[in-house]
Amino acid sequence: MSTALIAMGIVILVCALLRFSIVLMMFSSGIVYLWLKGQDIGLIVDQTLNSMFSMYVLLAVPMFIFAGNVMNASTVSERIWSAADVLVGRLRGGMGHITVLMNVVMSSMSGSAISDAAGPGMVSIRMMEKVGQYPRGLAVAIAAAASCLGPIIPPSIPMVIYALISTASLGALFLAGVVPGLLMAASLMLWIAMIARQRNLPFGQKISLSQLPWVLWRAALPLTLPVMLLGGIWSGVFSPTESAAMAGLWAIVIGAFIYRNLGLKTLIAIFAMSARQSAVVMMLIASSFIVNYAITSEQVAVQLAAYIASLNLSAIVFMLLVNVMFLILGTVLDGAVMLLVFVPVLLPTVNALGIDLVQFGVVVILNFMIAMITPPYGLILFVLGSLTGVPMKEINREIWQFCIPLSVVMFLMIFFPSITLWLPRQFGYLG
């Protein structure tokens, strides 16, 4: 291991401890490495950007971000909340169940945990606090845990990035996330039911049968988006990139022309916000390429693969060790860093052990979602804490317990790969 690589690692560690932005951390560490190696920084950056320009799958990222922002700005979240209220609102702790169901639906539109937390999550927190009289920390914790469904239930921005770095089929990844996502939702609802009994959380309101058709009809139109989006991909009508563009177009049609609650001024603001968010993601990917260049140049991945092969680990033992390591690192590192820095290092070993890339991808993305709600550095917790004004101490006291059901689902996926691979096989993506 060279001095330059050690210096890069030290810079990453220091920046993480100082809570620098991920982009600044990645760029700083990469440039330090190139400088110490005496390489032409401009040439490396130029090659990195040229590589990104040829990766058309990246076009899906801004489109999914835009579609999610349009849906959040319209009345879609409120309509989905009302429909979920019809189904589970009358149960004890019903508002917690509604939050999970609403995120199941919204996850099939946005693909981002942060978008789901800041959009539907805020609607849920407001209802749980004001109507259900939930403790503030518990309301935020439920919304944060439910937002983890976003990148697992397709479409998924992290899956787009993983497909980019692993060459796994994006269509197969989208299919592979469906069953785990539903299992996550079921596990969270079971956990909420247990908490509701322990804390005597209130029952939801009963909606009369005469109101039922109207409430469900109001939510019917937004539900056409995931059907069109995912059906287009899996039927072969759209590529994932084309389907993302269609999602953005259909979101505009629903919000601006059907519901008519998105004026030109609001739409321009959404375009601007989506452009800023997309720029952050693209800068993150570009900066990770520089770090990955350093790792590749030092042959870290090859050496790690050879070392693990010498240990004669089975595929399951390897998966267990990797995910336990990621769960620990998730308490101090952001999930995006682990996805963009650590996963490329592990991919040669994954291939050598015969682990399916789709299976590995869905499992580690779920792991990174757990990292995003794990104190003290869970990104979703910081986002919701800043938006709601709820002290982090109250949120941290409640959020730990929701990591348990999600972790159980993750380990079930490790021991039973068919949970993730069954659906892609049915559609012919995998042999």
Image (cartoon, rainbow, N blue to C red):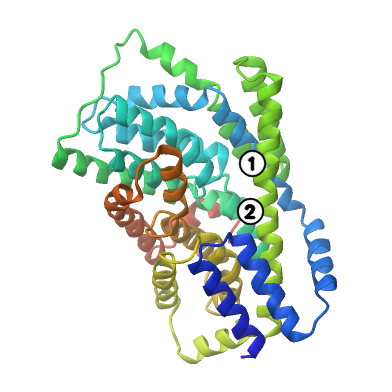
Which residue is identified by label 1?
64
Q: What numbered label is drawn on residue 218?
A: none
The residue indicated by pointer 2 is: 160
Q: Earlier in the sequence, mark 2 or mark 1?
A: 1
Q: Is residue 269 above or below residue 38?
A: above
Vertical relation: 308 (above or below) 114 = below
Residue at 27% x, 30% y is: 94
Task: Say if residue 381 shows up in the picture.
Answer: yes
Q: CA distance from mark 2 to mark 1?
A: 10 Å
Q: Locate residue 392 relative to residue 364 in the image: left or right.
A: left
Few, some or many residues within 10 Å of mark 1 (<14, 14–19, 20+):
many
93 relative to 48 in the view: left or right: left
In the rendered structure, the answer to whether residue 76 lies left or right of residue 273 reads: left
From the top left corner, tell me how far across and down residue 268 is, in percent: 71, 28
Please tell me how crowded label 2 is: few (under 14), some (14-19), or many (20+) other residues with Cα within 10 Å: many
- Secondary structure beneath label 2: helix
The C terminus: image quadrant:
bottom right
Tell whether 390 sits left or right of 118.
Answer: left
- The amino acid at mark 1 is Phe
Q: Are marks 2 and 1 in contact (CB under 8 Å)?
A: yes
Q: Nearer the viewer, residue 317 or 77?
A: 77
| Residue at the image position 64 percent from the left and 73 percent from the top | 29
User: Residue 231 occupies which quadrant of the picture?
Assistant: top right
Give whichever of 386, 156 is nearer the camera. 386
What is the three-letter code of the residue carrying label 2?
Answer: Val
